[in-house]
Image (cartoon, grey):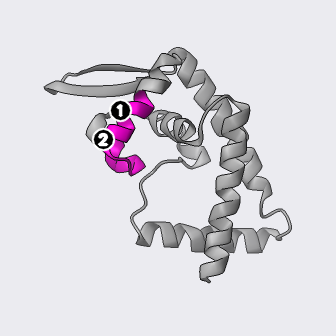
Amino acid sequence: MVTALVRASYLVNAVYAESAREYGLTPQQGQLLCVLMSRSYGMGELSATLGLAKSSLTGLVDRTERNGLVRRGSDPDEARAVRVELTERGAELAKEFYAETCRRVEKLPAGLGDDARDELAALLSRVVLDNDVPEVFMELDERH
């Protein structure tokens, strides 16, 4: 079980990294864009969701902002807080990156029949739910 999960994680991460590279992103920037597709986030929320220390997150947001993909804005509920959101360019890139990455990951279990694919999806969803994994990548039908 451990070997299978670790190898599956490696496989998905490799596909994700390759897709990010082709879009001129680091895997972390790709994750950031995917998280921000649904809404803006405060820096504290992003830190918890992405599992990054605040200093690492600040550097990630800085680099992604310099590339014109995200912007910082004020938080209407908290005067000193900052929210991060996609720019128009960032939203378009996130949409393309997300769709391409989904297409590639969808191919990974291509050797399985429909029933086995459905069973695998159900089992992995259960593992994710049982471990309270943050929503860093939305379901296809949750995008809009």
> Which residue is labeled 2 in the image?
54
Q: Nearer the viewer, residue 19 or 133?
A: 19
Q: Nearer the viewer, residue 34 or 57?
A: 57
Image quadrant occupied by the N terminus: bottom right
Counting labels gives 2
Per the rendering, the mark at residue 58 is: 1
Check residue 60 for magenta coloring: yes
Residue range corresponding to the magenta coloring: 46-61
Per the rendering, the mark at residue 9 is: none
Position of residue 119 measured from the top left corner of the image (x, y, whole percent): 67, 74
Can you say whether 40 is above or below 136 in the image? above
Is residue 18 left or right of 110 when viewed as pictured? left
Position of residue 91 measured from the top left corner of the image (x, y, whole percent): 55, 24
Check residue 138 for magenta coloring: no
Label 2 near label 1: C-beta < 8 Å? Answer: yes
On the image, which quarter does residue 40 sit in? top left
Looking at numbered disc 1 in the image, what kind of residue is underneath it?
Thr
Residue 114 visible in rendering:
yes
Residue 99 visible in rendering:
no
> At x 63% / y 38%, what residue is drawn?
98
Task: Sort mark 1 into few (<14), some (14-19) or many (20+) by Cα contacts within 10 Å.
Answer: some
Furthest residue to the bottom?
Answer: 1
On the image, which quarter does residue 47 sit in? top left
> At x 83% / y 71%, what residue is drawn?
113
> At x 52% / y 41%, what residue is drawn?
28
Secondary structure beneath dot 1 equals helix
Secondary structure beneath dot 2 equals helix
